[in-house]
């Protein structure tokens, strides 16, 4: 990490509570969490918003993670690609997750999931090109305004998070890295 952050042993107050919750659930404080402690006043609101978007996601955790993986690819973000490749692999298997990462349109997903991911991808590549026709197309698959807002929130927030993580030098913890060096390389962006 490029920035000086609050180490778990130094944490106090709200930062300490957030760190303790992460240690209890994951066995460690992730760099993705710790990197926000350079601005401790931002850590709690960011964590709260992430949990609010993810835990209240109207299309379920699987679709949230699909969006996150595709978005991370196009940011591009090594950190989020590794973390969400691992998380999604635990849900749909490593091979299908790899297929989604490489070409979600030919990865055995449903037509609504493909449309959802195309929308998330466009948000990441250039959201200014999205128009009413794109939203109307999503509605043909039964997506509600809530669903569409959730897709846009998940993709947009991941753009923000991923870009921040890379900007401050957060690196994926070793247990998020795939065992295959080729896959690790595929998920990684070469830093200058």
Image (spheres, helix red, strand yellow):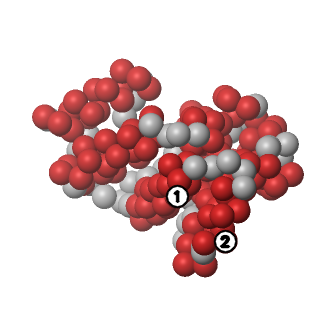
Q: In the depicted view, which residue is nearer to us: 2 or 157? A: 157
Where is residue 174? Give x, y as percent. Answer: 55, 38
In the displayed orientation, state which residue is furthest to the bottom.
129
Q: Judge the density around disc 1: few (<14), some (14-19), many (≥20) Cα neighbours within 10 Å.
A: many
- Quarter occupied by residue 178: top right
Determine which residue is flagged by label 2.
133
The answer to whether one can see residue 14 in this image is yes
Mark identifier at residue 165: none
Determine which residue is flagged by label 1.
152
Q: Is residue 15 left or right of residue 138?
A: left
Quadrant where the C terminus sits is bottom right
Pointer 2 or 1: first along the chain: 2
In the displayed orientation, state which residue is furthest to the top.
24
Residue at x 29% of width, y 33% of height: 19
- Regarding mark 2 in the picture, which secondary structure is present there? helix
Q: Judge the density around disc 2: few (<14), some (14-19), many (≥20) Cα neighbours within 10 Å.
A: few
Q: Is residue 117 above or below residue 86?
A: below
Q: In the depicted view, which residue is nearer to us: 150 or 70? A: 150
Front disc: 2 or 1: 2
Residue at x 36% of width, y 21% of height: 24
Where is residue 67? Give x, y as percent. Answer: 61, 50
In the displayed orientation, state which residue is furthest to the left.
13
């Amino acid at each position: 990490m490029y920035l000086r952050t609050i180490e778990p042993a130094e944490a106090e107050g709200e930062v300490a509570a957030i760190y303790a919750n992460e240690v209890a659930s994951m066995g460690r404080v992730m760099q993705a969490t710790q990197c926000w402690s350079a601005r401790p006043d931002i850590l709690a609101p960011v964590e709260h918003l992430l949990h609010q978007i993810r835990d209240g996601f109207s299309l379920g955790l699987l679709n949230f993670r699909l969006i996150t993986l595709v978005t991370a690819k196009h940011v591009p973000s090594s950190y989020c690609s590794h973390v969400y490749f691992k998380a999604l692999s635990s849900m749909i298997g490593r091979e299908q997750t790899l297929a989604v990462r490489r070409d979600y349109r030919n990865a055995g997903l449903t037509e609504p999931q493909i449309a959802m991911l195309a929308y998330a991808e466009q948000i990441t590549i250039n959201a200014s090109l999205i128009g009413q026709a794109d939203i109307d197309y999503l509605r043909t698959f039964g997506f509600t305004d809530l669903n569409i807002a959730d897709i846009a929130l998940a993709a947009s927030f991941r753009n923000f998070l991923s870009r921040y993580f890379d900007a401050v030098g957060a690196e994926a913890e070793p247990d998020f890295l795939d065992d295959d060096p080729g896959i690790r390389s595929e998920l990684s962006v070469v830093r200058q």
